[in-house]
Amino acid sequence: MDWITIISTTVKAAIGVETVLYALAAIGINIHFGYTGLLNFGQAAFMGVAGYGLAVTVAVMGLPFWLGIIVGLAAAVVLAIVLGIPTLRLRADYLAIVTIAAAEIVRLIFRSVAFKDIFGGSDGQRGFSDGFYALNPFPEGTYGIGWFSFNHRLLWVLLVGWILVGISCGIVYLLMKSPWGRVLKAIREDEDAVRSLGKNVFSYKMQSLILGGVIGCLGGFVYGLAFASVQPDIFGTETTFFAYTIVILGGAARVFGPVVGSMIFWVLLVLVNGLLSGAVESGIITFMSPVQVGPVRFILVGLGLILLLVYRPQGIFGDKREIAIDAR
Amino acid sequence: MRRAVIAFTAFLGGLIFLLAVPAQAAAPDQGLRGSLKLQGQPVNGVKIVVTTESGQPVKEVTSNAQGTWEVPITDTGKYKVTLDVKTLPPNAEIRGGNAVRTPTVFSGNMSTVLFALQPKGGGGAAADTGTSSFWTQAAQLTFEGINLGLIIALAALGLSLIYGTTGLTNFAHGELVTLGALLAYLFNVTFGLHLIPAAIIAVIVGGMLGYLQDRLFWGQLRRRGTGTIAMMIISIGVALFLRYVFLIFFGGQTESFSQYTAQPGVQIGPISAAPKNFVAMGIELAVLIIVGIALLRTRTGKAARAVADNPALAASSGINVDRVIRIIWTTGGAIAALAGVMLGLSQNLKYTMGQDILLLIFAGVTLGGLGTAFGALVGSLVVGLFIQVSTLWVPPELKSLGALAVLIIVLLVRPQGILGRRERIG
Amino acid sequence: MRAETTTERKAAALAAFKDLARDPGVPKPDPILVVDNVVRRFGGLTAVEVEHVEIQRGSITALIGPNGAGKTTFFNQLTGFDTADGGTWAFNGNRMTGVPAHRVARAGMVRTFQLTKALSRLTVMENMRLGAQQQRGENFWRALIPSSWRGQEDAITEQAEELLARFKLDTKREDFAGSLSGGQRKLLEMARALMVKPELVMLDEPMAGVNPALTQSLLGHVKDLREQGMTVLFVEHDMDMVRDISDWVIVMAQGAIIAEGPPDTIMSDARVIDAYLGAHHDAPLSDKELEEQLHEAEEALEAEIEEETQK
């Protein structure tokens, strides 16, 4: 087995592109679910509309990069409003079903033949990231020490990505210490009580949905820019569920929970993948074929999610007293 | 609780063992396959010729009733695949006109060869063959919609009853549907049983697994006082887990049962359908009516509705809530398995078949009103009908979209669903 | 604090009620809340049908009635937690019909709930702070700039500390509200409602599920509200308590107001006896009564479960 490759890819995964984009998606979900108690199962759609907003603006309409970013952000805000109006007055499980349905609608539209001219069907869109790489301050080359080396493009993406993660965490930290955050947490506990104290619960839920959606949508940008393409099936429901696993792993309603969760999640996933693939290739494991390694990752995520919620619903760093899972 | 998880793992282990058998028997390691469809309808009887790159013949196959074909290949490398244009239906042609593909076969991989078909004479979707008017088409689609609606209703009934009695929004219910279909496939194709006994066994095993799931897992969680939202997320974990266990042991390909796949259609009035569809609908309807009557008339059924209405009150009036929930899970598992078999019969078997239909099940349940058994029936029929009939106007690839949009609109105007009650506060 | 010497406020309230008729809907000298023709139906069942009622400013008014009389539903209509099928009501002369719950609270009409709604995973102090109005930091953009709300937060905290001390919860200020006992939660809910600085406090069964040792202190707090110039309207079952603290009693049965009067004589009113014991004491229970009993059992159970799961 190629231990060096396995270990180096694992170490890199701790700060890699997937970690960044899932951390952003998970920070958004943490605002929705961890702090406000909103079950948004359509986070992938927020990432999707942002990624496609950027891609279509730049690649199809030929407009500049920064305009694409604005279009993507606006699309996420509009999606939050459209989803929120019918569902935020309803029970939590309705929001879950509606958001997951809306995410599927968005994905089906992106991959449909009818809109192939705009969204590119199941192949998606590419060729919209030049504007981003034109801003790259790093000259061509490889940077870093030993295993931690990246080419200039990846370094630029990671730098921007981690800055976004940092800013998002900062915003969440400031907000959740403020009276605004207090209202959100109170809504999570009992919205009728909050209403009886003169707060406009609907408005706060909507603000939370928009904020979490916008932060999550940054993950969509990071994906699109890092891989220089967007495909519809990247933004499926499983992406959302991965982000939920990450939030619970790191501890819901913790500022850094989603970031730490994302790092642990991807390190484990990459490690397991490396070990299994290595073991299959070198003939240590004979009952599996290489193509079966991929599904094993998902099985482990599923199992991990079950075990976490059963044994440590507060996550790795959470406080048992303040588990953000509805236990009423 | 530790016991519960060990038991659950053992249960899943057993499941893996059960499913492990077809893994060896099913599908060759590598090869070529494809699926021929014209406007969403499978095209059968089309000849596909596979040769090596140099022209050495390998195999000739024809597409089956699902429009699929498959050629197992021993040596990896480049192959030439030719579609015999003469065997296409007279109204179909290959998009782009090129009837030859040269795919590469990799070790342990089934490569898909794509031939996109379109109606002759026009690239558009609305090309009418002239034989079917709008109304015959509408009647045909209504029939298909009822067919789909009944299948959704079978699955939705179980989901709705489980939700009503335990408060669990079960995202793994789609996997119970898949499980039923795959179990039937196991007994039918791998063990060579006729489909009818295989289906019966699948339904029985599905019911047993439903019972065990509650006994060993969900019931234990309830006893621990796990919240409904935590349980909902746990069910997502279960769904992910099961789905990819299916993928490992069943594979990513599309399969069909050994019997009743290629049935010639019969014409009844404006509707043309294979006889299996009529029989399937009959069975679905019968099962739904039996379950409905059981809910209305039997002691257990009444108890189940009482528990759904108010578990605490039901318990205080002497109903054994745990027993009722266990019966519900058993029934739910069994009818979900039946839904899987029926879905496999009318479409195809795939490891994602349950996931694909899950949102439609949710749509049906929500449309009818969460937790109301009869609402689920009505809602599902509406969803099924809506999906099929909407293809009169929207492209088939977007047909589910309409149903999901309707779900959202209904929640906007009547959140309690068609048959649900407006909740009384305080 | 006990009522050995009647205080000025109490005397004023009693004077206002002195010569009033005992008819339902009798006009009061200085009403803070005036309700007309409020109707709420659930399917075929009419839960509330109140023709006219007025609540006297500066008094403690009790709303009593047998189970299923529609008291809580009536509360929900008035406070915007449920939509009435018809009717109008005015608070301080302002029309409140159809006003959403949070605006009702802002207008100065604050309620508590039958099943206590402590925000379990917030601390006692956070619960209190939440009640404050006009906190600038509750705006999204200002929340990002701590200096814009810090000063106000300190003032709010001070005010909250005073109230907590008065309600003897000051030692619990950093505990999670979920860790309090049932009675302490009731106290917290009342204190939190006071943070809104209401004119009218509406208490839905303030004594339900409270340990008898705490009852006296809760009673004292309710009386205190009047002493501070607030108006209190409360739903209660315990007649001893009603007699002890209320200045005026309104009786509801089957959704309608059937009688009003001072607490010491209201229970001898024939209409009230009929409502409580049924006009036909010996006749078997009707379907509706059965349903009410069922509802009662249901509520008790739900309360029990809530209590159980919140531990």
Image (spheres, coloured by chain):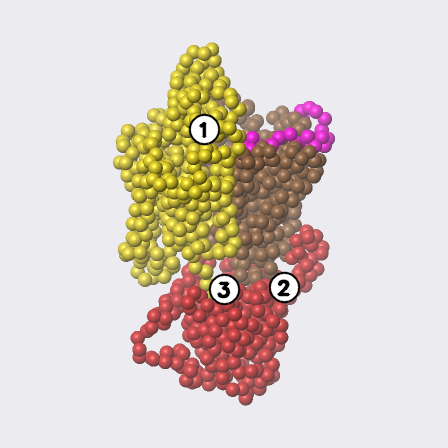
Which one of the lettered chains is coloured brown?
A
| Residue A196 on image: x %, y % | 56, 64
Amino acid beneath label 1:
Asn
| Residue B97 on image: x %, y % | 51, 22
Above or below for A174 versus C103: above
Nearer to the camera, B2 or B82: B82
Secondary structure beneath disc 2?
loop
Q: Which residue is mark 3?
A: C116
| Residue B47 on image: x %, y % | 40, 21
Which one of the lettered chains is coloured yellow?
B
How much space separates mark 2 and mark 1, taking CA atoms?
Answer: 73 Å
Q: Residues within 10 Å of mark 2 (few under 14, many from 20)?
A: many
**Comes first in the chain, label 2 or label 3:** 3
Secondary structure beneath disc 3?
loop
Q: Residue at x 49, y 75 (%)?
A: C50
Amino acid beneath label 2:
Ala
Colour that chain C carries in the picture = red
Q: Which mark is residue B91?
A: 1
Q: Residue at x 43, y 33 (%)?
A: B41
> For the magenta stretch, what is the residue range?
A121-145
Q: Which residue is mark 2?
A: C132
